[in-house]
Image: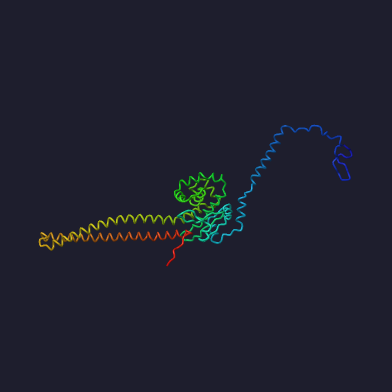
């Protein structure tokens, strides 16, 4: 090293540069490169593998949810309107749920509009809503006593949209629990009798999600519905509330039918007994009058008196039987009138939820 330049630097016109070794001092390129110690080989490979694995994990974590993006775009600018906005608010969806719902652009429609979009293939039933071609349509039903019917219908159709977005694996993972709840629920089993669908779990998934309380569900179903409803229990309560009106009416009508049938059986017995009593009294009265007109009809005044008093008692008893019969007929007629009034009210409620019902013209 130059004693005058102990730092190994040289000056040049371009500035200070490192004093590199002369060419002849460099290691021959034909000489074998020194191998790194073997003890480091594993660490180097392991580091490479770790970096690759970390890259794969990072890639997986950033997979794009194209369905969510598509839903966001589809729901962009959607405005529900004042009435439907309140219904949507009531079912209180999570962010994921709201994104899916907006993508379906729900519409609350009059009968004619609704029937154009929702053609039910189910006989003897009222269609309250439908999920068709990615859209949700709700029949605009307003009856104060049926509060909750719009919310329950919207939630039901919304769950069809959720099902449509689930993969085959996701659906399969819930199939056992759906079947378990279905097998234990007679109401849903009866409801499903009218359906002829290729994928019954689609409908069962919507019914269980809107008709069965969360505490009655297996853990996987509770977790599934909780992804979309902030308060699943409150959503189910809307169905329970409006459906209870129909259930109470049905129960009362069935009880009235049973009471009327029982009263009619008793009335037949009472009429038969009254007729027999009436015929007996008339026969005894005829005999009494014939004997009274015959000088030898009675052996004594005492026999006459006793026969007369017996007829008076018979007449009183016959009058009492008549009064009881009339009272029972009036009671039965009240039951029949009550039944008829409730049946008319039930029919009116049924017509109010039937978009195809056309009232008869009044002349």
Q: How many marks?
A: 0
- Residue 322 shown left or right of residue 94 in the figure: left
Where residue 163 sits in the image (x, y, percent)? 55, 49
Q: In this view, does 326 lie above or below 204?
A: below
Q: In this view, does 148 lie above or below 177?
A: below
- Residue 123 shown left or right of residue 68 in the figure: left
Quarter of the image with the N terminus in it: top right
Q: Residue at x 30, y 60 (%)?
A: 329
Where residue 353 sits in the image (x, y, percent)? 47, 58
Q: Which of 98 and 47 is in front in this view?
A: 98
Q: Which residue is drawn at 24% across and 58% down?
A: 275
Where residue 144 sits in the image (x, y, percent)? 47, 61
Q: Is residue 331 above or below residue 65?
A: below
Where residue 282 sits in the image (x, y, percent)? 20, 60
- Residue 42 shown left or right of residue 113 in the figure: right
Quarter of the image with the C terminus in it: bottom left
Q: Which residue is drawn at 85% across and 39% down?
A: 20
């Amino acid at each position: 090293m130059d004693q005058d330049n102990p730092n190994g630097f040289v000056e040049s016109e371009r500035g200070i540069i490192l004093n590199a070794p002369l060419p002849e001092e460099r290691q021959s390129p034909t000489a074998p490169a020194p191998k790194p110690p073997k003890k480091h080989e594993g660490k180097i490979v392991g580091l490479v593998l770790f970096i690759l694995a970390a890259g794969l994990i990072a890639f997986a974590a950033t997979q794009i949810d194209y369905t969510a993006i598509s839903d966001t775009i589809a729901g962009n600018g959607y405005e529900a309107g004042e009435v439907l906005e309140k219904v949507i608010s009531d079912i209180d969806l999570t962010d994921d749920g709201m994104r899916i719902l907006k993508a379906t652009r729900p519409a609350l429609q009059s009968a004619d509009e609704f029937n154009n979009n929702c053609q039910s293939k189910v006989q003897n039933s009222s269609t309250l809503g439908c999920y068709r071609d990615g859209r949700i349509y709700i029949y605009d039903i307003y009856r104060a006593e049926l509060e909750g019917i719009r919310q329950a219908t919207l939630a039901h159709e919304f769950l069809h949209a959720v099902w449509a977005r689930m993969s085959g694996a996701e659906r399969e993972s819930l199939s056992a629990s759906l079947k378990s709840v279905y097998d234990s629920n007679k109401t849903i089993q009866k409801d499903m009798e009218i359906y002829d669908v290729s994928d019954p779990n689609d409908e069962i998934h919507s019914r269980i999600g809107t008709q069965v309380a969360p505490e009655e569900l297996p853990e996987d179903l509770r977790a599934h519905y909780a992804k979309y409803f902030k308060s699943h229990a409150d959503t189910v309560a809307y169905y329970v509330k409006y459906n209870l009106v129909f259930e109470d009416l049905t129960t009362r009508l069935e009880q009235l039918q049973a009471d009327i049938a029982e009263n009619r059986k008793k009335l037949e017995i009472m009429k038969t007994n009254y007729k027999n009593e009436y015929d007996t009294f008339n026969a005894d009265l005829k005999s009494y009058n014939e004997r009274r007109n015959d000088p030898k009809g009675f052996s004594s005044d005492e026999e006459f008196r006793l026969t007369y008093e017996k007829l008076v008692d018979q007449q009183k008893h016959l009058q009492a039987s008549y009064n009881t019969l009339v009272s029972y007929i009036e009671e039965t007629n009240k039951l029949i009138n009550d039944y008829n009034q409730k049946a008319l009210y039930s029919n009116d409620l049924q017509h109010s939820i039937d978009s195809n019902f056309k009232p008869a013209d009044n002349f």
